[in-house]
Structures are given as structure tokens and as C-alpha cells.
Amino acid sequence: MYLRLAFRNIFRNRLRSLITLAAIAFGCISLTIAGGFIEDTFDQMRESYIRSFLGHMQISKVGYFEKGAARPFDYMIDEPEKALGAIRSNPSVASATPRIEFSGLLSTGDTTISLIAQGVNPKWENEISTFVEIDAGENLSEGDAYSIVLGKGLAEALAAKPGDPLILVANTRSGAINALDVEAKGVFHTSSKAFDDRSIRIPIDTAQKLLQTKDIQTIAVLLDDTGKTDLVKGELETAFAHNGLDLEIKPWYEMADFYTKTVDLYRRQFFVLKLIIGIVVVLSVFNTMNMSILERVGEIGTLMALGTKRMGVISLFLLEGLILGVIGGIIGLVGGYLLASLISWVGIPMPPPPGATIYWTAKIKIVPSVLAFNFGLAVIASVVSSCYPALKASRLEIADALRHNI
Amino acid sequence: MEVVKINGACKTFRVDRNEVKALNGIDLSINAGEFLAIVGPSGSGKSTLLNLIGCIERPTSGTILFEGSDVTRLSEDELAEIRSAKLGFIFQTFNLLPVLTVRENVEYPLHLRKTAKDERDKKTLAILKEVGLEAHASHKPSELSGGQRQRVAIARALVGAPSIVLADEPTANLDLKTGEDILKLMKELNRKHRTTFVFSTHDPKIMKLADRILELRDGEIAGKQCT
């Protein structure tokens, strides 16, 4: 009976209830769109980092990530084929590619610039680095030797273009200086301007000749699903231990410092937005309930005179808040879903994020957990804001309340 | 048998900084099956006395025995249970719940008593038939005339077979003819079900139907003083 009473009471003053429902639904839709936009931004940013250069994880000799920057040749993987075999036998691994990274100098004859070089296997690297885009010339391909591709910023600084001869100078593993004549095959860009300003990619065989080593430093691994990162990391660690491989794994999120800090910052900002919208919903429902009580003092007196306990009156008003929250939440969810789908279909053209060079199209990601949270927030905010009016109604003196009927 | 026995009940209200005595040393016994009229001018304490009998207000002093039990010291919830189980109310302004239909209004007290649906339906339809409103069961109160609304209120008061029905000026908002009809209906139900009725009124014609008339003046029946 309370449910019936509560439901009908809500629609007594239709305009007021509709405004309240609109406020709740608007809050829900705002959170769905804002949350979906942020989640999509995170996704695209994450995937661009992973598929530009990080991979889902990188595998190296134990100690490389901690001390390898100073003495990289002390931490080389000396059995690359065995390690690659163990990694590729995991069914969730989509691709794995060896890399060797070193610093050096690149010269056109007139201009010389220091750089970071990545020795890569062109065939496998192209499976992982799908977000690397070629601006001029061509990317490295299988069978290439003595060819390099340059980051856009580096190419501009050197005024180098595809087909230009260049000299690459680096320290060998033994510490001697070695130089190679190479040809600029192409110019690329990734999502990171910092990477593009100082990086080249070179076939790993050529890099090994330059460095006079047959070993590799890291293996970049791409999975079939980013969500499996931790699971596969655990499986590979077990496999390495089983095969006697002294290797360690660094997942993408430990390497993508800019990404994790950006996510942290955005999540805090989004929390403030949630708080503001929650307050708007609370105030809106509070106002409706309070007005409703003022109009229904006589009725509350009648209910209590007939034998309704004070707890019953509280339940009635809390139910009204709950129903408002549930209906407003459902409208908000459906409205949010439809609007999010429409916006995603159209797409939002976005400028490059800080430190990046690529324009991108944002969408609104529908995240079930975000939808559930928004719905929960609408319901909880509505019920919470009904508490004080409900208590106020239950504390009315029956005789005083009954006089309002006259 | 006494349904209600009031001993030396006083009720004082505080208005601003002044104390106003609404009832002053009331002694009253109401017997089962009685059709009792409480009369007196406005402000004489009729409504306050009905509120005390109806467990809506507590006396400032004195005791009220309801079917032999002192109700003056009961908790709010215990009083609510007595109102639900043993009392029926008829108000001057009908006080029907506007969002409920006639039938739902009448069965509301049975919901409070957690009566099973079958029994609830049976009792509700029976009492609606008795007050002549079975054809209006699905109407909303706003679709009824004043007299019809008061009949719904009477049905609601009687549906749970209470020990006593309290009616505060039940005919004040009705025209003379309708008022008389309502009083006659109450009297008929009083005779038929032996339900005790206590009602307040100004109307001398209605008073004639009462078994007993209790006259209140300035909150007193017989000039007793609060101690």
C-alpha cells in the first residue's frame, strides 16, 4: 500500500515531479557523457602508447629496467630465440618482437644530432607498432639493411628526407666507436612528440652489426586484449621460471608515466564533477520532498490518526525519493546511452593532447560499471535527500497536522 | 461495559507565553454501544476531548482508560496500534487520501492491520455496500459529492470493526439534509453493529439522535479544577 501511495503521490504534481525527474536524469546523462568521454580518452591514449612503442609489456634481463640505463650491455638477453619461443607459446600473445636500444649520433655531414635508436625486426615490429604513421617515404620492411626511419621532429632538425644518406655513430658493446652509412627510408610520427623528436628505428640486424653483438635487450609483447596484461604477465613469469630464463617483465602501465598521471588527474576532476551533480540531484529532490510535505501536512495527520506509525510515514517519503531516483535514473541511463551512441556516431574532433602531435576523434565509451555507478548515484542521492523531509513529516504532531485539513 | 473511562483529565496548551486550559478536570465514562453527542460552543474543548479519547493527544494530567488499560503512558507506536486496531475516525473535512480510490481509502486501515487480501476485499465490499457506495468503489474522492465522501469516511472508520468511532463535527461541511442522512446512517450502523459512536456537533437537530448529550463549557463538564 505504501508503494502504491508513494507512486501516486509522486505524480500528483506532475510538473514538479517532471522537473525533479529531469534534474535527476540530466545529472545521470551528464555523468554518462562526461565519464564515457574520459574513458574513451583514456582508452585511446593508452592504446596509442601501447601500439606506438611500448607494447603491452616489455621483457628484459633481470636488472635491466633498474640499472640498464647506465650499462645497457650488461643486461642483454643472450638466448633470444628461447625467450621468444616461451613468450609466443602463450595463446594470449598476439606478437612479440626483439629490440635493441642505444644512443648515438646521426649526421648528414653538415648537421649532427644525438638520438635514441631502436633496433627492431621490421616484420614483427609492424605488427606491434600499428599506431606509428609514416609521413614521408616508407616504413622499414623485412629484408631491409642499412636503412632507417626517422622521427618527424628529428628529420626536421636534420633537414633529412627519404633517400638521403646519413651516418649513424654509436659505441659498440666493447666500448669502441663504430659508424655506419645508412639511408633515410622514411619519416614517422607517433602519439608522443618527445619520442618523434629524438628517435630512429633501424633493422635489428644492422643495429647488432653496429653494436657488434648478437644479443638483444628487450622483447616487446602485444596481447590480444589489454585487459589480460596482468594475467599474461603472471603466466609468462611462471613460464620463464620453468624454462630457466632469467627475465623480468614490465607492464605497459609502469612505463607510461604520462598516461597514469593524466588518468589520475582526470579521475580527480571527474570526482569533483560527480560531487557537483550529486549535490544538484540532492537539492532538487530535497526541494520537491519539502514542498510535498508542506502541501500534505493534513494528509500526514490523517495517516497517523488512522494508525500509521511514524516509521510508516518515514517509509512513505523515502519510498517516494527512491521511486523518483529509480525513474530518473532509468531515464538518465537510457537518455545517456542514446546520446552517447549519437555522439560516438558523429565523433568529436579533438586536438592533439599535450606532448602529442596527432589529431584524433573522441567518442563516448559506454562503460557498464560507469552506467551502474550513475544509476546508483541517482538513487542514493534521491533517497538521502528524502531523509530529512521524511523525518520532518514523521515528527508532525497529529492534532496540529489535522488542523491543516480545515 | 465501559469502553473509555476518563478520570480528571486536563489538557493545557502553551500559546506564545501563555498557558491555555482546553480541558479542565474531565470525568467521563463511555459505554459500549453508546451514541454519545458532545456539544458546546467553539473553543469549549470538544475536539480536544475527542483527541484524548482517540489517543491522538495525551492529557496534561489525569488518566484515560481504554477498555480498562491506561493509555496515557503508552509510547507513540503503542498508541498508533490502538488507533489502528480499536478506533475509527470521521472528520469534519472527510480527510480521504486523494490519490487513492474509494475502495483503497476504505481498505487502508485493514492494510495497517496486515489483514489478508481475501478478508480485506470481503470486508471492504461489505461496508461499501452498507454505506451505499459499492458502485463508486473505483472512483477517486474528487469525483464524489460531500455526502458521498463522508460515507466513504464512515466506511473507512467502520471497516475494521473498531471498539469506538469518533466523529468530529461530521456534518459541519454538509448541507442540512445530507447531514441528517449521515447522522441517520451512523445511528443505523450503531444499532446494527453495536459500535460505540462519539461525535461532536453544534446542530440541535442532530443532537436529538443521541442516546446521551455531554455539554462542554470552557473545557469543563461539572466545574472541576485541575490540581
Image (spheres, rainbow, N blue to C red):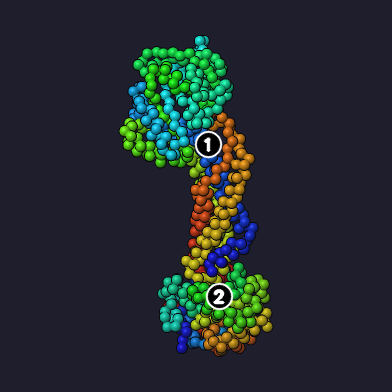
User: Do tag 2 and tag 1 residues touch (Cβ < 8 Å)?
Assistant: no
Q: Amino acid at mark 2?
A: Glu
Q: Quadrant of the C terminus of chain A?
A: bottom right
> Measured from the top left, where is residue A209 in percent x and y?
42, 17
Query: Is residue A346 visible from the viewing direction of this image?
Result: yes
As shown in the figure, which amino acid type bears the numbered disc 1? Gln
Residue at the spot x=38%, y=21% of the render? A214
Task: Identify the residue shown where x is 56% and y is 77%.
Answer: B121
> Extreme top residue here?
A110
Question: x%, y% of residue A145?
Answer: 48, 19
Query: Which residue: 50% across, 76% down?
Result: B115
- Provide residue A268's location: percent of width, then percent of height: 48, 41
Mark 2 to mark 1: distance in Å?
60 Å
- How many dots with numbers? 2
Image quadrant in which the N terminus of chain A is located: bottom right
At mark 1, the secondary structure is helix
Q: Is residue B19 left or right of residue B146?
A: left
Which numbered disc covers residue B107? Answer: 2
Q: Nearer the viewer, mark 2 or mark 1?
A: 1
Is residue B225 visible from the viewing direction of this image? no
Q: Is residue A160 above or below residue A364?
A: above
For disc 1, the marked residue is A44
Q: Is residue A374 above or below residue A386?
A: above
Q: Secondary structure at mark 2?
A: helix
Respond whether the residues carrying marks 2 and 1 are from the same subunit. no
Nearest the eye: B28 or A337: A337
- The one nearer the camera, B6 or B209, is B209
Q: Position of residue A111 (x, y in %)?
A: 51, 12
> Is residue B6 found left or right of B41 in the rendered image?
left
In which quarter of the view is residue A88 placed?
top left
